Image (cartoon, rainbow, N blue to C red):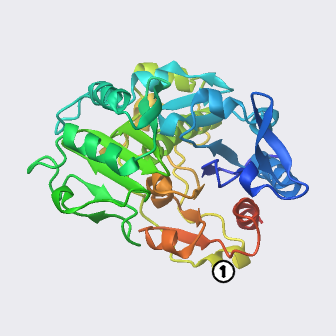
Amino acid sequence: MIKKNILFACDIDNTLIHSFKHRCPGDVCVEMLNGAEQSFMSEAAIEMLKEVSRSLIFVPVTTRSIEQYLRISVFRDLHLPYALTSNGGVLLVDGRRYEEWEKTSAVRPCAESLYSGSDAIELALGILSAAPECTKTRLVDGIFAFSKSIDQGRTLSRLKESFGLNSAGVGSASAISYFDAAPAAAITVSAAATTAPAAADVDIVSVKSGVRIYCSNGKIYVFPREISKGVAVRRLMNVIFAQHHINAGGSALDPDMLINAGAINLYPSMSIGTGGSTLNPDMLINAGAINLYPSMSIGTGSSGLDPDMLISAGGSALDPDMLISAGDSSLDLDMLNIADIAIVPDTEMGKKLTSGVRLIHNGEEPYEVFVLQSVLNVLK
């Protein structure tokens, strides 16, 4: 089967797989940890995922570490060419870490930030390691800091204080966003006036400190601000579709050569291209429409495509005919917001999206089944 020029970027945990806590009779184990069954999928979902991966370009996008991702057997069995792990900080190509990706990742200082990405994470690790309420503190794949806290509110306060998020000019309204405070895409508030509930999901982005702090159910993540799923997906589209369009023109160039030559813009703008459709989900599926955004292929049929042509004004990416994304948390929001079609678990998360067609889980079937069936419906 010839794959359609469609990219499906999808979160993993609680979107495609679920833990033993939500296991149903007949579910298939897809992850083992220390000899114990860890994660599951239904047989129906596994079969649908196989069909999806045959029909388009499927890329798992996860905050899991490389090791945690590679434990998932269903992805190994599918021999997926690409996966984004570590919240997009790591690209796996055919299951192997692609080091060129990280050489151009956002570990450099941002012009408006006080810290480089690596300095900020080193500071966070020191804070979390010294906090008595925190355990299992570690640096994940050299990208971000992680810890488990029995007092999430206290740990968050420590991080805010250490990064100066409670002081004017650093933790000001322009620097911090609480994505989960209300059903809006992002509500910006003053850190000094806000005390987050201890167990609530909190997502803070600080431009001045150059960090993103995400807390959920006692799990604490501190990322360099520029490391996100949405940025990673846009970067990956440049790699995948630059290769696709050049190969269509008969060139022998590959992504390695293009990245090393600087021909691919690894930091494209986050804006979605013009020409968007206002079709609603029912119209989209019933009409069998595929191309919400015109294909941006260039040089079709030519044999002498110049790599310089790949760099377009404004740094925009070479795009697929369609980008479909699915996720379940605020860490997925920027990835969902650049998608032509975004699949979300509930109405509240749907309200946080600002663009694209939204397919909202109806609650009548497991979310993983809804996600994959929605993708297959679009492909019809």
Residue at image location 41% in from the left, 21% down from the top: 103
Residue at image location 78% in from the left, 66% down from the top: 380
Q: Is residue 147 above or below residue 94?
A: below
The residue furthest right is: 26
- Examine the rendering and report whether any part of residue 304 can be seen: no
Pointer 1 local density, CA inside 10 Å: few below 14, some 14–19, many at least 20: few
- Examine the rendering and report whether any part of residue 6 can be seen: yes
Closer to the camera in the image, 58 or 332: 332
Residue at image location 16% in from the left, 42% down from the top: 164
* Amino acid carrying mark 1 in the image: Asp
Disc 1 element: helix
Q: Is residue 33 above or below residue 21?
A: above
Closer to the camera in the image, 113 or 314: 113
Q: Is residue 65 left or right of residue 27?
A: left
The residue furthest front is: 132
Q: Is residue 96 left or right of residue 349?
A: right
Q: Position of residue 342 (x, y in %)?
A: 56, 63
Which residue in the structure is indicated by mark 1? 282
Q: Position of residue 124 (x, y in %)?
A: 32, 31
Q: Is residue 295 left or right of residue 193?
A: right
Q: Is residue 211 above or below residue 199?
A: above
Total residue callouts: 1
Q: Position of residue 356 (x, y in %)?
A: 49, 67
Residue at image location 66% in from the left, 80% down from the top: 282
Q: Position of residue 91 (x, y in %)?
A: 55, 30
